[in-house]
Image (cartoon, rainbow, N blue to C red):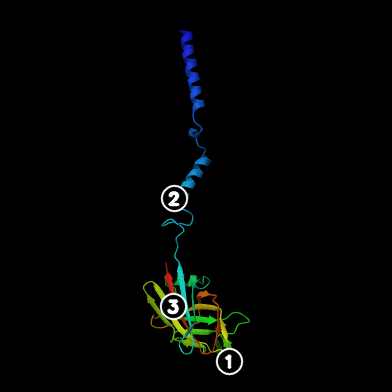
Amino acid sequence: MKNMSFDKFAIGTLLILALAVAVPVGLTQEKPAQRAAQQNAAQEKHNPAGQETRGGPHEGIKVHGHWLIVIRNADGSVASLHEFENKLSPFFATPFLAKLLARQASVGFWRIDLLTVSVTGTQPCSLGGTPSGCFIDEPGNPGAVSNSFKNLTVTATGGTFILAGTATVTASQTAEIDQVSTHFIQCGPTLDPSKSCPSATGGEFTSHPESITGLVPGQHVDVTVTISFS
C-alpha cells in the first residue's frame, strides 16, 4: 500500500510538471508595464492624436477677429482686397474683458488704426503736414485727431461684434500700411450706455501685421472687422 501511494503521488507530480512545461508562452501573466502599454495603444486607437474629447480639459473660449480691407480708387473701382484673421491682444484686452464681466468697467469709443511701423515706410495719412497713420473713429468721439475719419459704425449681430469704416489716403506720395489694430476706451462702471467717456484710458483690442503697399493719395480704405466668440 505504501508503494502504491508513493507511485500515485509521483505520477501526479510528474503530470503537474508536464502541464507547466506545456503552457503556451502567450498565456503567461503580463507584466504591469506591458499591460499599461497595451491600454495606452487601445486608447490612442479609439481617440487619435489631435482629437479633443468632448467636454475635456483642452476646450476653451476663443475670440476671433476677421478683417476685410478693400482698397478703392477715387472712381470707386477696387484696387486690391485683403482678408485675414487676427487674435486678441492679451496685454490690454484680457484684463479689460475681465473687468467688464465683473462690472468694474464699461466700454467707451472704439477706433481702428491703419499705419506703418517700418522706419522706411511712408505713413498713409498726415497730421498737420507730418506723415501719420490713419484713424477711423466713431462720430461722437471728441478726442479724435485731425487725421481721423469719424465714420466708424459699431454693431452687433447674433454672436458677432462688427466695426466698419473708411479712411482716405492723404499722404503726399505712395504709402503703405503694415500694421492694423482695433482700440477701445475704458470707462467707469457707471457710464450711461448712450454716452462715452472722453478719457484716453484704454488700449489695443486686436492687432495684425498686414502688408498693404502701393497706396496713392485719394484712395479709400474700407475696413470691416468682425469679432466673434466660440
Name the outermost residue toward the bottom. 128
Q: CA distance from mark 2 to mark 1?
A: 66 Å
In the displayed structure, would residue 225 be above or below residue 4? Answer: below
Judge the density around disc 1: few (<14), some (14-19), many (≥20) Cα neighbours within 10 Å.
few
Q: Residue furthest right?
A: 120
* Relative depth, front residue between 216 and 172: 216
Residue 180 position, x and y percent, is: 52, 78
Q: Is residue 50 above or below residue 193?
A: above
The reply to whether residue 164 is in sight is yes
> Label 3 belongs to which residue?
107
Q: What's the residue type where badge 3 is placed? A: Val
Q: Earlier in the sequence, mark 2 or mark 1?
A: 2
Q: Nearer the viewer, mark 1 or mark 3?
A: 1
How many discs appear?
A: 3
Q: Secondary structure at mark 1?
A: loop
Q: Position of residue 46 (x, y in %)?
A: 44, 50
The image shows residue 124, relative to residue 225, as above or below, that is below
Residue type beneath disc 1: Gly
Q: Position of residue 145 (x, y in %)?
A: 51, 88
3D distance between C-alphas at marks 1 and 3: 32 Å
Percent x, y of residue 99? 45, 71
Q: Which residue is mark 1?
A: 129
State the image quarter where residue 176 is shown: bottom right
Which element is circle 2 on? helix
Identify the mark nearer the N-term, 2 or 3: 2
* Above or below, 74 relative to 39: below
Q: Are marks 2 and 1 in contact (CB under 8 Å)?
A: no
Identify the residue position indicated by label 2 in the image. Answer: 46
